[in-house]
Image: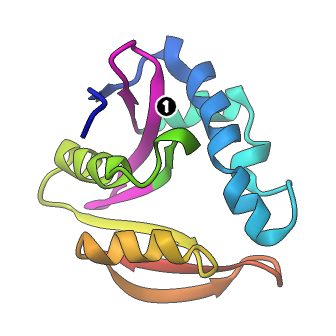
Amino acid sequence: MSTEYKITRASEEDLQEILDLQHLAYQSEAALFGRQDIQPLTETLDELAEEYIAGTVLKMTDENGKIIGSVRGKEADGTLYIGKLMVHPDHQSKGYGRRLVTAIEECCPGRRYELFTSTRSVNNIRLYESLGYKKFDERDADGEIRFVYLEK
């Protein structure tokens, strides 16, 4: 891997940069549905700040300190709910998403881990299954989007 990276907990000062990355990284998901109103693209800084306070937000930075990836987790009743895994489009397919999922799991060892993605997000499903996640449910979100839920 040519790029040096570091995964650490995000600070409040990182939230705007993470939100900007989120809006960029989720463009490919929006393209799958042909619409820009998916939640990761409509989330506000205040909503991200609420997630930050309620859970764990990790960031991956490159050798220049620029945030190139992020993932969030929120623990409840022995389960870590993992969400908003994102890697900058210029850094995808380098194993960074895998490293971020592993890092968020390490923040809460020995838990049950749960996450979801769209059934159209075949690459994400493949990634999660390669990390040991198993499908346990599918649900329609709004008639156009169907989510698949995975656990480990």
Q: Nearer the viewer, residue 19 or 76?
A: 19
Residue 139 lies in quadrant: bottom right
Q: Nearer the viewer, residue 110 or 124?
A: 124
Number of marks:
1
Q: Position of residue 62 (x, y in %)?
A: 37, 23
**Quadrant occupied by the N terminus:** top left
For disc 1, the marked residue is 52
Amino acid carrying mark 1 in the image: Tyr
Q: Is residue 50 above or below residue 150?
A: above
Residue 44 shown in magenta: no
- 122 on left or right of 78: right
- 148 on left or right of 146: left
- For image coordinates 23% across by 52% down, the residue present is 102
Q: Secondary structure at mark 1?
A: helix
Residue 117 lies in quadrant: bottom right
Q: Which residues are magenta?
A: 56-82
- For image coordinates 17% across by 47% down, the residue present is 106
Q: Position of residue 114 (x, y in %)?
A: 37, 68
**Residue 89 visible in this rendered orientation of the protein:** yes
Residue 71 shown in magenta: yes
- 103 on left or right of 70: left
Q: Position of residue 65 (x, y in %)?
A: 39, 14
Q: Is residue 104 above or below residue 17?
A: below
- For image coordinates 53% across by 81% down, the residue present is 148
Q: Position of residue 10 (x, y in %)?
A: 40, 23
**Residue 152 visible in this rendered orientation of the protein:** no
Q: Is residue 106 above or below residue 52?
A: below
- For image coordinates 31% across by 55% down, the residue present is 98
